[in-house]
């Protein structure tokens, strides 16, 4: 009888009970539910910052172009801006996509004013999360800039 109790005690020490496993799974699930949205938000903030840095980089090259050519490229196609900047040697690698993987948008119809847009996190134009840059100033900084 004593030997049976010792064997039962040894079996219990080897593994966890079903309740212990279920509690562990529940705790891990709760932690995952809390941390996944925080991770996604941090990733979106980082992408916004990267997009703003790329736009600033592009804007500096546009200023060099304008100082040589007296006007900004007059087009609404970012690919044409890329060709003009690469051809003139202003940038070797011209960013034409934002950090979300979507194409940047560029407009300059008069050669004096220009606009660079990113559609932001949601990928839709003209929403609150867009990043808009014009003539050296961020007009709209995305969703997380002021947080």
Image (spheres, rainbow, N blue to C red):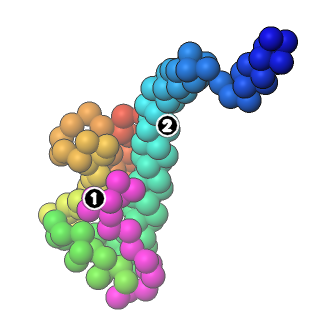
- Residue 93 forms part of the magenta stretch: yes
- Identify which residue is drawn at 43% across, 86% down: 89
- Identify which residue is drawn at 35% across, 88% down: 87
The secondary structure making up most of the magenta span is loop
The residue indicated by pointer 2 is: 39
- Identify the residue at the far front of this view: 1
In the rendering, at what x and y percent does residue 111 appear? Answer: 22, 67
Does residue 83 sit above or below 9 in this rendering? below
Q: Which of 100 and 4 is in front in this view?
A: 4
In the rendering, at what x and y percent does residue 16 appear? Answer: 65, 24
The residue indicated by pointer 1 is: 102
Span shown in magenta: 87-104
At mark 2, the secondary structure is helix
- Residue 33 seen in the current view: yes
How many circles with numbers are drawn on the protein? 2
In the rendering, at what x and y percent does residue 51 appear? Answer: 41, 54
Residue 124 located left or right of residue 36: left
Residue 143 occupies quadrant: top left
In the rendering, at what x and y percent does residue 133 appear? Answer: 33, 50
Does residue 36 sit above or below 68 in this rendering? above
**Mark 2 or mark 1, which is nearer to you?**
2
Residue 72 located left or right of residue 75: right
At mark 1, the secondary structure is loop
Distance from Cα at disc 2 to Cα at disc 1: 21 Å
N-terminal-most mark, 2 or 1:
2
């Amino acid at each position: 009888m004593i030997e049976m109790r010792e064997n039962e005690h040894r079996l219990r020490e080897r593994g966890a009970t079903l309740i212990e496993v279920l509690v562990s799974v529940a705790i891990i699930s709760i932690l995952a539910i809390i941390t996944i949205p925080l991770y996604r938000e941090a990733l979106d903030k980082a992408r916004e910052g990267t997009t703003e840095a790329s736009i600033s980089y592009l804007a500096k090259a546009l200023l060099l172009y304008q100082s040589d050519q007296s006007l900004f490229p007059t087009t609404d196609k970012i690919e044409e801006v890329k060709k003009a900047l690469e051809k003139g040697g202003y940038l070797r690698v011209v960013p034409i996509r934002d950090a979300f993987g979507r194409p940047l948008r560029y407009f300059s119809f008069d050669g004096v004013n220009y606009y660079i847009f990113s559609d932001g996190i949601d990928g839709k134009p003209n929403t609150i999360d867009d990043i808009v840059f014009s003539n050296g100033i961020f007009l709209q900084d995305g969703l997380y800039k002021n947080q």
